[in-house]
Image (spheres, helix red, strand yellow):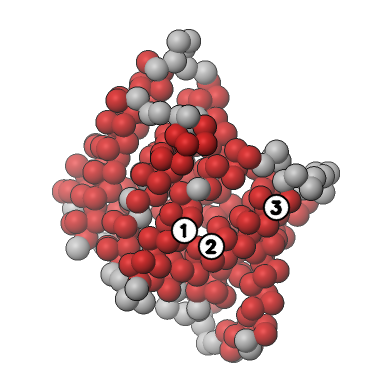
Amino acid sequence: MGHLKIIAAILIWSSLGIFVRKVDLTNVGIVFHSCLIAGILQFIIITSTGQLKSEIKTKSSKRDVLFLILVPLSFIANSLFFYYAFRNTTISNAVLTHYTAPVFVALMAPFFLKENIRLSTWAAIALSSIGLWLILQGAESESALPLSSNEKMGIIAGALSGLAYAFLIILIRRVASCYSSLFITFIQNSIVALVLLPFILHLNVTMQVLPYLIIMGVVHSTIAPILYVQGFRSVKANEAAILGYCEPVGATILAFFFFHEVPGITALLGGAMILLSGYLILRARK
């Protein structure tokens, strides 16, 4: 059952690029409103069940509280880079470059988790670097004109979202043993909405985009993360990470049906190398 919950969450997230493209709003506006809607829903659930009181009474160190506060800040960086990539390059390029995250986690693990860097990590870094270069080259060769600076920045933003997501993974590892998944998600969405509030005061949300934002808040920012974290109760972390590779497959298929985007051979090869680098990391950790 845990495997099915994780797969369901991943397939939900694979549709995120479609929603970002459909919403006629700035990236900051999308992140703010989806997190606001999710935060309100989660507040209702967490207070009606009495979970908020029990979480507040939980004894935790100042370091745990600090990490809990850093989670939403990493989430903001991850989301803004990821959404920028969705808007400026193909959805498959955005998702594939985002999957440099396992390599970044392996690089940061010695500093944050006191883990040694293995030889397989350096091999994975080389593979992912070549893969990223191939995606850049593939995007340029498939275009009749030289690759625009926006598309290059979109591909780089995808990799930067992977870096931010790696920080997010490490932080959640530290706080997951102290707080419930719903409480962590609630705190994340609430702080994100507060931080971004000053930047959206001039934005107008139309009735055309509101349904998309509600779906993103309820489905992508509430249901999916709860399913994902619940899945960890019966699924090993390495298994869950491998299941995560369903996302680029799902995102590529959805991009084909909605936007007729077909990745070229070079881009697919580069993406395969990035995914292989992540698999090497996971296999070594196992």
Q: Is mark 2 on a helix, strand or loop?
A: helix
For the image, the number of numbered tags is 3
Q: Where on the picture, by quarter, is residue 253?
A: top left
Task: Specify the amino acid type for callout 3.
Answer: Pro
Q: Where is residue 242 in the image (x, y as percent from the top left)?
A: 29, 56
On residue 211, the disc is: 3
Q: In this view, does 232 lie above or below 104?
A: below
Query: Toward the viewer: 62 or 1?
Result: 1
At x 46%, y 69%, the residue is 227
* Among the two numbered marks 2 and 3 on one chain, the one whose residue lies closer to the N terminus: 2
* Among the two numbered marks 2 and 1 on one chain, the one whose residue lies closer to the N terminus: 2
On residue 140, the disc is: none
Asked if marks 3 and 1 touch (Cβ < 8 Å), the reply is: no
Which residue position is annotated with label 2?
71
Q: Where is residue 140 in the image (x, y as percent from the top left)?
A: 41, 18
Q: Is mark 3 on a helix, strand or loop?
A: helix
Position of 159 with respect to 215 (left or right) is left
At x 67%, y 70%, the residue is 41
* Among the two numbered marks 3 and 1 on one chain, the one whose residue lies closer to the N terminus: 1
Q: Which of marks 2 and 3 is in front?
A: 3
* Quarter in which the C terminus is drawn: bottom left
Task: Specify the amino acid type for callout 2.
Answer: Val
Looking at the image, the residue that sits furthest to the top is 145
Asked if marks 2 and 1 touch (Cβ < 8 Å), the reply is: yes
Task: Specify the amino acid type for callout 1.
Answer: Leu
Which residue position is annotated with label 1?
168
- In this orientation, does residue 170 appear? no
Q: In this view, does 168 lie above or below 131?
A: below
Q: Nearer the viewer, mark 3 or mark 1?
A: 3
